[in-house]
Amino acid sequence: MSAQPPKLLDRFTAAMRMRGWPPRTIEAYHGWARRFILFHGKRHPTELGPDAIQPFLSYLASERHLAPSTQNQALNALVFFYKDFLRIPVPDLEYLRAKRPKRLPVVLTKDEVRRLFQHLDGLPLLMARLLYGTGMRLTEMLSLRVKDIDCSAGTILIRDGKNRKDRITMLPDPLVIPLRQQLSLARQVFENDRSHDLPGVALPDALATKYPAAGKQWPWQWVFPADGLSTDPRSKIVRRHHQGEHVIQRPIKTAIAASGITKAASTHTLRHAFATHLLENHYDLRTVQELLGHTNVTTTQIYTHVLNKPGLGVRSPLEE
């Protein structure tokens, strides 16, 4: 029986790749299926049945003390594992979904954003300005390709964002020249790779099958190529990937401390600031929702609670 889980999980991973899922989601779901099988003594999931999901989630909550969002990811993974992969009917398990505490996002003021930028330079500064100026998620920015940037139109096309949605956001004028300079550097890396006949960049699965040579073409190159080569975890091909999250996360952490900002800020805080400052500038909620790529406007509404003058702009009696 112990030889079955690896084979089963390999097929599970292949099924997710066939659907074109992001690598991080595939890795997370694969991990939850593996931990689920190990938790139940390596018994085959078809032998266990969907009823085995509840004790596993109880263990994650009571023994591991995992965050509600992590518990819910495990639930989503196992429901997909049984219902869509194993084709075994799953009862309604919404009652198992952990309730997430309602916390307001950490938001930097405009002055704090300026102070933060003063302690950054080079590539981290460009990336930080992109996150704040466009509202992109960190992974969306890092995976930008050359063809997604339209300097003439002043737009950035974000492909396969959260929930696999494409959307368009603005390219702020102050970033056009720095981005063109970055593209020039990326072009040098691209031409050097071509001169050494290195494998092309990774492509979405369907495109890689239909146009295998596209990975060696300029439009498909990463805007932020990594400094060195690495092994593609899926194909095992040694190729150039895009920059990793640490390239911006570490400088941001250092800059936050150096600027004297006491808030628990991170790279994602710049996305929160983007949304909040647009609302402060009286842009409507639906516009901000589209720019952020939120499926539901209620997700965007949380930023209305962190405005400097929320609601009706009530004055404290101390100000009278």
Image (cartoon, grey):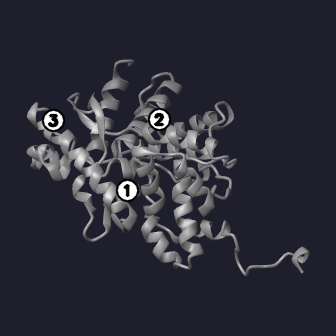
Q: Amino acid at mark 1?
A: Gly
Quadrant holding the N terminus: top left
Residue 108 visible in the current orientation = no
142 above or below 129? above
238 above or below 311? above
User: As drawn, is 229 to the left or to the right of 58?
Assistant: left
Estimate how packed mark 1 is, as few (under 14), some (14 to 19) or many (20 or more) residues with alpha carbons within 10 Å. Answer: some
Q: Residue at x 28, y 42 (%)?
A: 17
Give the labeled residue for mark 3.
193
Dot 3 lies on which element?
A: helix
What label sits on residue 32 in the rendered view?
2
Percent coordinates x, y for residue 164 in the rendering? 35, 57
What label sits on residue 161 in the rendered view?
1
User: As drawn, is 216 to the left or to the right of 107?
Assistant: left
265 above or below 156? above
Percent coordinates x, y for residue 296 in the rendering? 50, 68
Q: Residue at x 67, y 46 (%)?
A: 260
* Residue contact at pointers 1 and 3, CB within 8 angstroms: no
First in sequence: mark 3 or mark 2? 2
Q: Residue furthest top?
A: 2
User: As drawn, is 289 to the left or to the right of 159?
Assistant: right
